Image (cartoon, grey):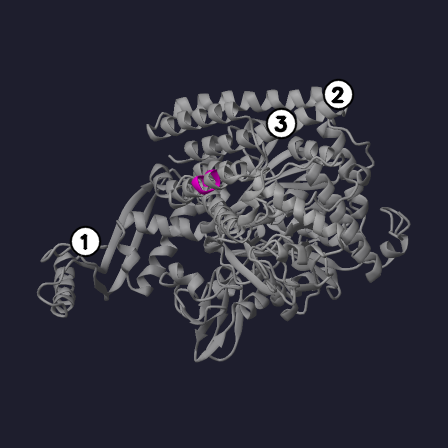
Amino acid sequence: MLMQIAEPGQSTTKEACKQRVVGIDLGTTNSLVAYVADSSPAVIEGEDGALLPSVVHYAKDGVVLVGKAAEAMALEFPRETLTSVKRLIGRGLTDLASIRGMLPYELEGDDRAVTVRIEGRSISPVEVSAEVLRELKKRAEASLGGPIEGAVITVPAYFDDAQRQATRDAGRLAGLEVMRLLAEPTAAAVAYGLDRGAAGKYAVYDLGGGTFDISILKLVDGVFEVKATGGDSALGGDDLDRAIASGITNGAVEIAPRGLVAQTLREARRVKHALTDAETVEFYLNVASPAHVRAEVIGGSPGVTIVHELITANADRMHTICGEVIASAVGKLNSDATTCVRCIGAAGVFARTITRADLAGFAAPLLERTAKACRRVLKDAELEKTELDGVILVGGSTRSPVVRSFVEGLFGKPPLSDLDPEQVVALGAAVQADVLAGGQHNVTLLDVIPLSLGVEMMGGVVEKLIHRNTTIPAGATQTFTTYADNQTGFDIHVVQGERETVDTCRSLARFTLRGLPPLIAGMLRIEITFLIDADGLLKVMAKELTTGMSAEVEVKPSYGLSDEEVERMLIESFDHAEDDLAKRNLVVERVEANRILQATRGAFESDAKLFEDPEVGVDVRTAGEAAMKSLEIAVAGEDHLAIRHGIEALDLATKPFAQARMNRAITAGFQGVSLDDAEKKIGR
Amino acid sequence: MVSPSTSEAKRVSAGAPDAFGLLGLEPCYAIDADTLEKAFFERAKQLHPDRFAQAPVAERVAALSKSRALNDAYQLLKKPAPRAEYLLARYGIVIGDNERIDPALIMELLEEREELAEARHAGKLVLVEKLQASMKARRKAAFERIGVLFAAGERGENLAAIKAQLILLRYVERYLEECDSALDED
């Protein structure tokens, strides 16, 4: 290596004017900033401690409040106080359909990007996040006594390109030079590796406010190698709050009016936190206004009316109100329609005693989803859980004893939380910022792509070029050929996902290699190359090897791919792994069989006189035709092995004929006729 | 004329022309995973793009492509099956997507698949686990056999026998995938 690299410890000039660079954990619920002082990272405290609530309040007079001050406004101004915007960043309206109804503020926008409607103006989640980042920047500058020159901002390992790009934009908007976006679990591992000297194989279980990541890393002598990563990018503390609220109200909150939802969720979160220290807590709601009533027709048996009551204290009053709403809902229906109506109302006091066991029950389905992701990642990393040296807890949600005991049960060992799970990500990010600025730490991060990349093949199956969990930067080259004779264009469809068929993967880009020489199927050699850089961005190149014709395209690998899609695609791919394989095999064999049938039939026709050759004979024709018939029957069926056997039988039956044709082609070649012409002569 | 696999993509032995060389190692099947990892980590530290964050553009680009080639080489060599395939490819022996396999063995494998499918449909997960364990043992034996064959010398008949083992391993892997999906269902 002759490149000039500042060797660790030799960068004396840099030390003298050490850059002011920070690590920022931009969280769903809380954010914080850290800095490497002498050699170890430390969190920079604000007036109210290290954690800055990721809450922004837009007041009517144009004043913007961030953090605790904004949080204090949430009850009074739910629509002007934005929480959990990390769930919105880089997302489109359709991505957010499932949580839209549970948000206290109004969403607008299109399928590519959402905005929030506040006081007649539209505010992008990027702007909201930038407010949070600006606040952290201010805090860091005050503490470090000068302008911040660069920042590493962390993102969930499962964040897609649009979400990463939007996060980067928020950094820029806040006036930060974003040096790198770093995966949160990786950052946490860095902090443990340095501070605790952790070495070996670790699982990082990161359950935050809105996302769940699970990564398995190997830590050796300054190298942090991500072995596998996975997660559930729409699963976090917010969802736990929802599960609690839904469980306590017996599902009623799901159809409650917006204001009541916000109030119930807040109480659910309070109860969840209180259960960290207490064994039992009272869930208590006092709803002053009886106007919180909503009814909806949900279908069901004719004439059946279901009344869901959130609050029973003032039952008579509730029934009166609900009755009116139901009557008007039913009145809108035709007499023969099914009329099942759910009604939710609230007035007065609603109180329930909640135990840790209740909480565990409400959380169980969500935690089971994390367990599934964990098992999958262990399998991807080819590790048994007993081989892990430790499990690291990250994210505010892992403070809960319910979550901790679940993780302990899952991995069979008590998880590590000696570094504050809410600070550890920012600490690791600070170290990485220091490394990028030429600092002293001996840290090399080897990260991976979270989802496989491939191209569409004939019949709609996917050929993966780069598999998920491949270390980046990465590259792959594969050669393809044409399917039809005289095909002059070659479509290249780049997709991402784990399933075997193209309709179940995410489409990333399409491009065409044109002007190919018209040759028989299978003659052309088209080489496709995928290149992924250190930021996970994909570039695709295609080249026809005999003519040298080429085309290339830059692809942002997961642009617009929603988290739910990432998740859904992964889950489905595992649920349908066997289906897919069979389906794929069947498609591949059918395509192959039809191609061979067509070619054989054509050759039999055009070269019928070859059967007069004693080396071949008419028996070959009879046998070949019989084999074609059986193959046709197999193609009509569903058994890919039968098709494969049919192809082999046909191959065997027509061998003498094929041999005779080949001999003639070769003879033609020796006589100075191009192979192409020879093929034409022999009837292709 | 009837040539299977023309409509299929043909795998080109991945990018690295000299995967072992990139890692500073002699071509060898029986390489210890720790040795391989150590060689990779040492070089990854030197070449990682993060180390060149402050370097001129040309150096950053060069580091990126070297780093990529190194990662590809490691990816190729770290698992025994692709490593063996890579070693065979040096002798021009390539395993296609539709390799022929001894018909008797096909019958045996089909019967085993059937047995697994029956166990799966009957929900006999304990049996599935048992079948999985025995197939894993078979996988282990195949890799051991490959190791013995490589050690015996990279000659014609040994290479052919290695190829046969690798083809068998593809069936074994599919079988094991099916076991996983059966056990994952609940």
What residue is drawn where x is 42% and y is 31%?
B183
Q: Quadrant of the image for the C terminus of chain A?
A: bottom right
The answer for how far apart the CA atoms under marks 1 and 2 are is 79 Å
Among numbered discs 3 and 2, the one appearing first in the sequence: 2
Provide residue A323's location: percent of width, then percent of height: 12, 63
| 1 and 2 marks in contact (CB < 8 Å) | no
Q: Quadrant of residue A24?
A: bottom right
Three-letter residue code for mark 1 = Thr
Please say whether residue A194 is visible from this viewpoint: no
**Residue located beneath label 3 in the image:** B164
The answer for how far apart the CA atoms under marks 3 and 2 are is 16 Å
Q: Are marks 1 and 2 on the same chain?
A: no
Q: Which structural element holds mark 3?
A: helix
Question: Residue B151 has which mark?
Answer: 2
Q: Is residue A648 magenta?
A: no
Q: Is residue A624 magenta?
A: yes
Question: Residue A312 has which mark?
Answer: 1
Three-letter residue code for mark 3 = Ala
Q: Quadrant of residue A416?
A: top right
What residue is drawn where x is 11% and y is 55%?
A304
Classified by dominant secondary structure, the portion drawn in magenta counts as helix
Three-letter residue code for mark 2 = Ala
The answer for how far apart the CA atoms under marks 1 and 3 are is 73 Å
Q: Nearer the viewer, mark 3 or mark 2?
A: 3
Q: Which residues are magenta?
A: A623-627
Q: Would residue A367 appear left or right of A145 to someone viewing this image?
A: left
Q: Are marks 3 and 2 on the same chain?
A: yes
Q: Nearer the viewer, residue B154 or A297?
A: B154
